[in-house]
Image (spheres, rainbow, N blue to C red):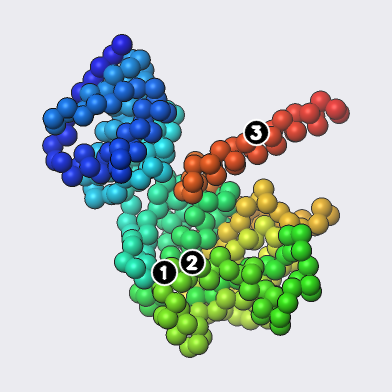
């Protein structure tokens, strides 16, 4: 049995570290198999020698984030535990990033993982950015946040959000209403992100003025988009031809962000994903960044990470069985 102590100078740091009903400390205890006790201004960590060492590194990392004014959430705790487990505790300092955007309710939007921070930096520094990764990694949300920030700073005049209306098991023709009503369900995640950033009234005002456009990918054909921040979401469901058409819409003073998850392609089996093709063709092209996020960058419920990991492991097993049959 090993025991180590960590001194906490300010009560606010302890409150932030422990979380509501000590939930953050409970995660550290469960994940690393240690016991953490708060005695006066000291934390006593006891358990197996290696586990205690990891817990000390994790708690020190969390305290350093707290000292920079970061709110500590369960997601922070799990992510930092993973960093120290893999020997990457030196990267914890990178987590305290700049605010990307402030929502209509005054909530600051920041990158929450190293991968997300690289993604945000790529958007800022490149004309075209491809953000590729599983569900829950913040690809679309951070892209919309960057677009709203650029709009507020008058770097661009217009935000254009688009998605391919690919039917994942259902048919557009059977949905009720006119064309806009039929495609609206496909665009809902984009509306939700914009409502969050701008508020419903401000969003509606900019929509009526033409400063914001949310439309299916088919509406982009034949246009040149100047002074715009253009986001193509769910790009794994574009064809090779659609992707080329979209990329060539880029005008002067514009940025493009393309997001997608190549593990969730809804195209027919004989169709090549435009996103997969673009990742291959555009690799190494100047002023284009390809940013790949992983399961470690998932910022939704922890069960989402576990689901993604389970599917990845199943894919590997299937690939091994397929190779063995050859």
Q: Nearer the viewer, residue 48 or 227?
A: 48
Rendered residue at 32%/34% (across/down): 25
In the picture, measured across the screen, residue 125 lies left or right of residue 96, that is: right
Mark 2 near mark 1, Cβ–Cβ under 8 Å? yes
In the picture, measured across the screen, residue 130 lies left or right of residue 147, that is: right
Q: Which mark is residue 82?
A: none
Mark 3 near mark 2, Cβ–Cβ under 8 Å? no
Q: Which residue is mark 2?
A: 193
Rendered residue at 56%/38% (across/down): 306
In the picture, measured across the screen, residue 309 lies left or right of residue 75, that is: right
In the picture, measured across the screen, residue 262 lies left or right of residue 128, that is: right
When the figure is inspected, residue 304 is found, relative to residue 267, above or below; the finding is above
The quadrant of the picture occupied by the N terminus is: top left
Label 2 to label 1, Cα distance in Å?
6 Å
Q: Which residue is mark 1?
A: 197
Q: Earlier in the sequence, mark 3 or mark 2?
A: 2
Q: Which residue is mark 3?
A: 313
When the figure is inspected, residue 153 is found, relative to residue 10, above or below; the finding is below
Secondary structure at numbered mark 2: helix
């Amino acid at each position: 049995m090993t025991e180590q102590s960590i001194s906490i100078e300010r009560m606010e740091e302890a409150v932030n570290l422990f979380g509501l009903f000590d939930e953050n400390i409970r995660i550290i205890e469960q994940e690393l198999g240690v016991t953490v006790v708060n005695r006066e201004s000291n934390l006593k960590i006891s358990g197996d020698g290696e586990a205690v060492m990891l817990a000390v590194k994790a708690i020190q990392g969390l305290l350093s984030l707290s000292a920079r004014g970061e709110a500590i959430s369960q997601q922070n705790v799990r992510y930092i535990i993973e960093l120290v487990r893999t020997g990457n505790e030196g990267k914890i300092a990178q987590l305290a990033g700049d605010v990307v955007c402030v929502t209509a309710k005054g909530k600051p939007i920041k990158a929450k993982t190293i991968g997300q921070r690289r993604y945000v930096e790529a958007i800022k520094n490149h004309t075209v950015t491809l953000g590729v990764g599983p569900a829950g990694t913040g690809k679309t949300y951070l892209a919309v946040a960057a677009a709203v920030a650029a709009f507020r700073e008058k770097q661009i005049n217009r935000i254009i959000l688009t998605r391919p209306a690919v039917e994942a098991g259902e048919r557009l023709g059977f949905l009720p209403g006119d064309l806009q009503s039929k495609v609206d369900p496909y665009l809902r995640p984009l509306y939700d992100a914009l409502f969050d950033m701008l508020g419903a009234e401000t969003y509606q005002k900019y929509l009526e003025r033409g400063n914001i456009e949310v439309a299916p990918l088919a509406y982009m054909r034949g246009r040149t988009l100047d002074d715009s921040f253009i986001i193509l979401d769910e790009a794994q469901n574009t064809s090779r031809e659609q992707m080329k058409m979209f990329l060539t819409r880029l005008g002067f003073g514009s940025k493009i962000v393309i997001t997608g998850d190549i593990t969730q392609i809804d195209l027919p089996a004989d169709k090549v994903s435009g996103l997969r093709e673009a990742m291959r063709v555009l690799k190494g092209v100047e002023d284009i960044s390809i940013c790949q996020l992983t399961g470690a960058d998932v910022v939704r419920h922890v069960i989402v990470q576990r689901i993604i990991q389970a599917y990845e492991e199943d894919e590997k097993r299937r690939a091994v069985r397929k190779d063995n049959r050859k």
